[in-house]
Image (spheres, grey):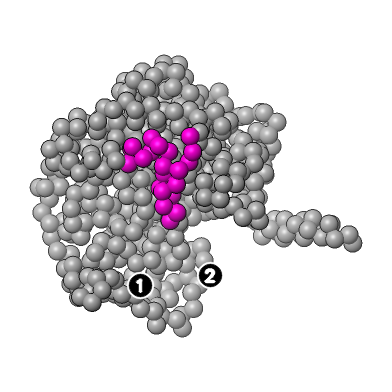
Amino acid sequence: MPPLEMPVLAQTRKVFSRLSTMGPHELAHRIREKGYSELERIGVRPNDSGTSAGQNFKRYLSDTASHRFYCGHRDPLVAFRQEQFPLWIERAVCEAERLCRHEVALLAYGTINLGTQIDWHRDPVTGRTWERRFWADYRLETNHTGRDAKIIHELNRHQHLPRLAKAWSFTGDERYAAEAVSQLLSWIDQNPPRFGVNWQSSLEIGIRSISWLWTIFLLLPSRSFDEATAQRVGDSLFAQLEHVHRHLSLYSSPNTHLIGEAAALFIAGLVFQDRKRPSVWLATGEAVLEEEAQKQFLDDGVHGELSSYYHCYALDFYLQSLILAEQNEYPLPPRIRRKTGGMLKFLMHLTRPDGSVPSLGDADGGRVLALHETDYRSTRDALCVGALVFNRRDLKYVSGTFSEDALWFLGQDSWNRYRSLKSELPRETDCIYPAAGYVIQRSGWGEQDSHLVFDFGGARPIYRRPRPRRFIVIYALRTRQRTSGRSRYVRL
């Protein structure tokens, strides 16, 4: 057999082998999704009549949709922040100046200059450009070109744009609004629907959509965000969210990918619920969030991937969805609130005395929404928000201080509620999570106390092979060591 035929034969065998393992529901889903993608390839787009933002979109945003979005964006907070948190404004302005120069902090690569004209398909680390293809033709898992899809995806999450918009809301400097609008429009020009690597992942589209929503509503009063801009951005946003709805990771990545996609659909669907397709997104997002809360989390509240980072990731999606639902008096299933509370409890015990989280399992390196923090090395912001949402005194104690995220999500009233909420030392210094296989012990809740996490194997994780019980991993640390001032990590 000619050597060139071998990869084709091997790939064919792999496809048939995979098909043989599929149940009837997965097989039907795969066939339906393949049908959708092939229709899209030839220009037939089902349901596209409902994915236009519609006429007078900026007026609709101002008069209707903005009242359903997180209340922090519409509070008259400038004077309040100048009085209470001047460092927040100074920090936001310094970063906005860098962003106007197209200097973006990207994962562990530090600050990178994207050039005068941003190419949203160019890997800013290697300088290589991703070719334009139909979205379903990318095979990123078998890429051998030396490019890391994680880098281009991280850039195109657009998590720096809400920070630009935030700087405009602090200062009223129209340069920041104009720069955010310019980047949005350049992305739309370079990324027509369904073509390019930035349409390849539904999760990445979902996270980008959340960033866009914050950017839109923060910039809504600015001169730069005019009706023509609102129309173009709205049309692209609706097309992206419809793509997510059509291509959920139900079987390809049924973990935090699916949670993230469902959260984006739920948030956007709730904000635009009086529109035709968003009402469908809302129903789908809610159903998936409820189902995955049951499937993906163990009985003790730990995410089934047994990764501290992905636990924070999933918690972030659920907490944002829960906050928006409660602000709109939308009745989410009680299971979602219970699960979110359990996730916060585990995170509280997992948090080290210095506010950081031990790195258990693998990690993504990014974040759901980066209004301030850009990763999950510290989780005090989530604990602060959780303390307010669940009225938990112990969460307030561990959070340590009021977070900027709480103000953006919950509005100015959250500051008064935080101050009136009594801080209370958590009752337990020892806590066991039998389903996850973790025992967490600490000598106390002070900054100088020791904190231990014992991994004794636990139950079979949901999305991984079981870990061998013969290994016991101990993560130990003592913050602010007298000798070096660093945390101590021990593995036995």
Q: Work out whether 229 lies above or below 143.
A: above
Placement of 492 over or under 77, stated as above or below: below
Give the mark nearest the N terminus, 1 or 2.
Answer: 1
Identify the residue shown where x is 38% and y is 26%: 178
Q: Which mark is residue 438?
A: 1
The relative height of residue 133 versus residue 418 in the rendered view (above or below) is above
Of the 4 image quadrants, the one containing the C terminus is: bottom left
**Label 2 packing within 10 angstroms: few (<14), some (14-19), many (20+):** few
Question: Relative to residue 358, is residue 418 drawn left or right?
Answer: left
Residue 82 falls in which quadrant of the image?
A: top left
Q: Which residues are magenta?
A: 95-116
Q: Which residue type does callout 1 highlight?
A: Tyr
Q: Which residue appears at 50% of the width and 30% of the height?
A: 186
Residue that carries the numbered disc 2 in the rendered image? 465
Q: Residue at x 33, y 70 (%)?
A: 433
Judged from the image, the secondary structure of the residue bearing numbered disc 1 is: strand
Name the image quarter holding residue 76.
Answer: top left
